[in-house]
Image: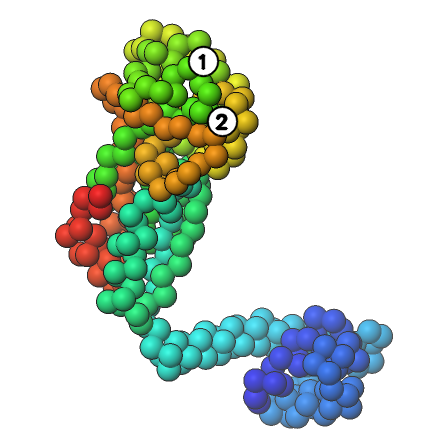
Amino acid sequence: MNRNQLKYFVAAAESRSFTKAAEQFYISQTAITQQMQLLEESLGCALFDRSTRPVSLTPAGKIFLGEAKAILESMSRALERVHDASTGLTGALRVGFVRGYERSDLSVLMRSFHLQNQNALISFYRCSTDVLAANLTQQEYDIIFTWDSTNLKAQEGIEYLNVESAQLVVALYAGHPLAGRRRLSRAELRGETILYMSPDASNDSYGDAFFMQLYKDAGYKPNILFRSCDAECILMMVAAEEGISILPDYFTDKLYDADNLVFVPLVGEGEQEEIIAAWQSSNSNPVLAQFLSVLKKSVPLR
């Protein structure tokens, strides 16, 4: 019994046709038939009932189908591990980050870590805060960099580190009456049309409550024309002079010569976005442990 025989068997069993299995692997039907006969001889039992049209599996064949798939999957994993070892890849780190944070200094940290750990594959995932939190708790990611709009810090089994406190800025089009100001308060934005940069995709989140409270403390309810968790779309609308927005400065600091856009710091208590790195305390990934030791030494990133 060999790997090809198992692959041919699974294909024939699922298509209930030796002809279709042969076409799938670009070999003759005779070759498939011969390989299935050899497989049955090695197992000492019939796997196919050839008296039916199309062919069907015997009781033994039905059981062996599940076993064959498991064997093939196990062999594939073994081959991947051997390949990784031969190329020096011995671990992986899955990093999620909130949309826009790719413009921060996170890339500097990740590049430094990669250069010191070139045997580890580091993969990145850019999502809204609610998706990041969900995928972390479901063990899809090893660590995430996010604004805690889902109150992730309060969840059992989650550890976190405060990475940076990003200043909020007002994004205005160049011809706006407030574009020449050196700083602004939220109270001065009363009556403005707001293109709301939401921390996540839901309409009523922990993060939204935080920002709405800032507006309430400023003495008014915001006039929100449009809502999105995609900062690029928000800035396109600001540049088109459809309204103004409030964004974290890690997104705007590296926007040079932005067309028809001006960014003015927003001052006042609470006008910051706290970025945390969060991970599951039960995660035993050794690459994560290595990364955390580097991260804790590097904070603050900016």
Residue 272, horizontal then vertical, whole percent: 27, 28
Quadrant of the image containing the C terminus: top left
Callout 1 touching callout 2 (CB < 8 Å): no
Quadrant of the image containing the N terminus: bottom right
Q: Residue at x 27, y 40 (%)?
A: 276
Q: Identify the image's colour scheme: rainbow, by chain, secondary structure or one colour.
A: rainbow
Q: Residue at x 73, y 91 (%)?
A: 31
Q: Quadrant of residue 81?
A: bottom left
Tag 1: amino acid: Glu
Compared to residue 71, the image places residue 179 above or below, namely above
The answer, for residue 207, to whether it is visible in the render is: no
- Specify whether 102 is left or right of 25: left
Residue at disc 2, secondary structure: helix
Tag 2: amino acid: Val
Foreground pick, 137 / 259: 259
The number of discs equals 2
The answer, for residue 119, to whether it is visible in the render is: yes
Which residue, given by chain and number where applicable, does mark 1 sit on? Answer: 192
Which residue, given by chain and number where applicable, does mark 2 sit on? Answer: 238
Mark-to-mark CA distance, 1 and 2:
12 Å
Compared to residue 99, the image places residue 150 above or below, namely above
Q: Residue at x 66, y 80 (%)?
A: 9
The 10 Å Cα crowd at callout 1, few under 14, some 14 to 19, many 20 or more, is: some
Residue 185, horizontal then vertical, whole percent: 30, 16
